Image (cartoon, rainbow, N blue to C red):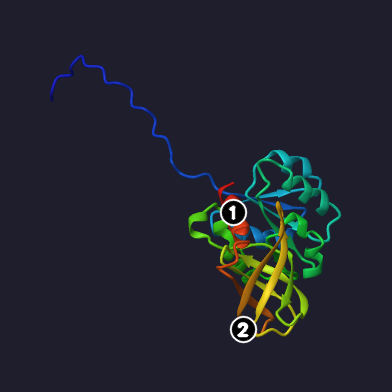
Amino acid sequence: MPKATGTVLAPVAPITSSKKAAARVALIDIKEAPAHTLSECFRQFGIEVVPLPASSAERLSKEKFEACVVKLKGAEVGPIMEAVRNSPSNSRMVIYGLGGSAQDAMKFSKYGINAVFHEPLERPAALKLVRATQMLVQHEFHRYVRIPVITEISLVTNDGRRFTATSQEISSGGMSMKSPEDVSPDTAVELSFALLTLPRLWVRATITWRKPNKTFGVRFDPKDDRRLRLKEWIDAYLEN
């Protein structure tokens, strides 16, 4: 056996973990059964779930969360969304609504609700929605090019027909939306809408597709420089 020497080894520096902290989603005043379903769905993608009571506006204004789920017909929904959007750390938080109709979601469109879990809550549908938005929650922005957001869109066709739609996803090149109005691909339209800190914007576009479920998509006119304001807003949203 070799003899020990008098050499003193320098202490080994502790290994610092580079593992990214888990994203957190607040379930605000959600009943046990839907909370259990939502928790299972979020945790499948490594997102931590934090149940909170209805009176959590102050906590949401100070503590960092990446997303929250709030009942659209809850008495505290307005103050909660107000606290979230006015918080320096949570102003870009992903907001999920729970229950209610598209009209209920539109009442709070100024707060930029991103997506809605419909009731009765079914696990396959909830999991599909979480899967579609989890990269945005986890700040994987380099892989996420579309932002889910619900707001009212006003459309005018070249022949003067006017109607409204509800946005679903938006990117710098176009957007998807839903409306009972009968529209056809290749129809030229002008859109008008506002998004959180983005004042009302008008931009020309062309309808590129329509599905039987009344959803359709538009591509912005690349020659319309007004769309650049939207691109700047999206870039700022993702960099925040």
Residue name at image x 63 percent, y 83 percent: 211
- Residue 164 sits in which quadrant? bottom right
- Return the residue at label 1: 232
In the rendered image, is residue 91 in sight? yes
Q: Which residue is mark 2?
A: 185
Tell me residue 216's x, y (percent): 64, 78
Which residue of the protein is positioned furthest toward the top in this rendering?
A: 6
The image quarter containing residue 218 is bottom right
In the rendered structure, which amino acid carries the disc numbered 2?
A: Pro
Number of residues whose C-alpha sits closer than 10 Å to that of mark 1, classed few (under 14), some (14–19) or many (20 or more): few
Q: Position of residue 1 (x, y in %)?
A: 13, 25
- Return the residue nearer the eye: 105 or 12: 105
Residue extending furthest left?
2
Q: Identify which residue is drawn at 73% across, 48% down.
A: 85
**Residue nearest the observer in this picture, 221 or 139:** 221
Judged left or right of residue 8, residue 233 is right
Residue type of the residue flagged with mark 1: Glu
Relative to 13, say whether 38 is above or below. below
Residue reaching furthest right? 75
- Marks 1/2 in contact by CB < 8 Å: the verdict is no
Residue at 33% from the left image edge and 27% from the top image edge: 12
